[in-house]
Image (cartoon, rainbow, N blue to C red):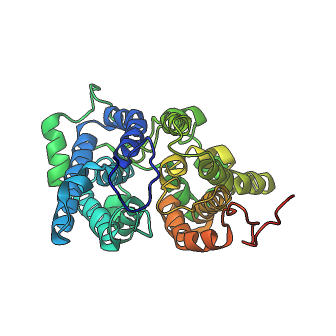
Amino acid sequence: MNPIAHSPHAHAPVSIGKVMGTVLLALTPATLFGFWLYGWPAINLWAVSLLAAIAGEAFAVRLQGRALRPVLLDGSGILTAWLLAISLPPFAPWWIAALGSLFAVVIGKQVFGGLGQNVFNPAMAARVMLLISFPLEMTTWVAPAPLGSAHAPGWLDSLRITFMSQPLDGMASASLLGHVKTEFTRGVGLDQALVGYYAPLDALWGSRAGSLGETAALLILLGGLFLIARRIITWHAPVAMLLGAAVPALVFNAVDGSHYAGPMYHLLSGGLMLGAFFIVTDPVTSPNTATGQLIFGFGCGLMTWIIRTWGGYPEGVAFAVMIMNTVTPLIDQYVKPRIYGRDRKGAALAAKG
């Protein structure tokens, strides 16, 4: 005899832990590429971010008197820290990763009540906080130094870079978006700014200066398609976000190609691809319906393009997601799923004889 229990009685074949594990698996190729491209400092930063998230979440859950094991084992805190880590400059100091992860899991998640209660995407909230508070550390980029290459930092050098903030000489560089934004402020046209800095194939493969795990657009795209194939996410928000950035880029580039970059530049640069498949698909902070996700995703892409084009920051994904997170309840209010037996407005359908 089955024991009596309160509702809900519906069961799903997947658990939160399995969903988080699948997303982490999808992120692994781009992350491993980032480890290879930037070497031991990137690995140190990733490890510090995850350890800080686990420690911070354990502390917050203990303060609330809740059971520790289910929270830590659901994988959501690790996924948050992972997403934040791969959006950081690979040679950033350890305290940037630690502070960001603590902010994400404690302020961005547990203060709101834990998984499923947070209003903003925790990883993007932490990235925005770090960008505003520590702009120098968050915009100091390095040229790729693949593991095993002659100019790659060794393990001891990496410890000095990560934990003592001692950058190696000759490795400083600029991200593509940052370089173009700087050139625009100097009055240089886009055609000249991109010379020697932008090649679509390099952007696709990721062999350029950028965040730890955001440069390999192709690997992130494949990870996203894997999540769609496993039905962890749907296509609506990712496709809408990519279109939200590509459509205005296409139109304005056609009008003035010397000042407005084309769609491929935006799609393959910065964190747009990561945001499309791994950020705007967050089930907690995105709308519930397919139509709502299309609106939300398109808004994120459009806001990203606006910020990149006219804003003060060269990259706009984190800000765009935060802005659209604030309108998620409004989207859900006006875009509701039809209730069985009722029309879109909630009125009962007439019975057919």
- Observer able to see residue 101: yes
Q: Nearer the viewer, residue 38 or 288?
A: 288
Rendered location of residue 62, percent (x, y): 16, 66
Q: How many marks are shown on the rendered structure?
A: 0
Rendered location of residue 323, percent (x, y): 53, 70
Rendered location of residue 195, percent (x, y): 59, 42
Residue sitting farthest toward the front: 1
In the image, taking residue 125 as reference, residue 328 lies left or right, namely right
Q: Which quadrant of the structure image shows residue 328?
A: bottom right
- Observer able to see residue 94: no
The quadrant of the image that shows the C terminus is bottom right
Up-down: is 304 above or below 311? above
Q: Residue at x 53, y 55 (%)?
A: 280
Q: Residue at x 66, y 52 (%)?
A: 240
In the image, taking residue 207 as reference, residue 96 lies left or right, namely left
Q: Residue at x 85, y 59 (%)?
A: 352
Q: Residue at x 31, y 60 (%)?
A: 137
Rendered location of residue 339, percent (x, y): 67, 63
Q: Nearer the viewer, residue 271 or 196?
A: 271
Up-down: is 191 above or below 284? above
In the image, taking residue 167 as reference, residue 303 lies left or right, namely right
Residue sitting farthest toward the right: 353
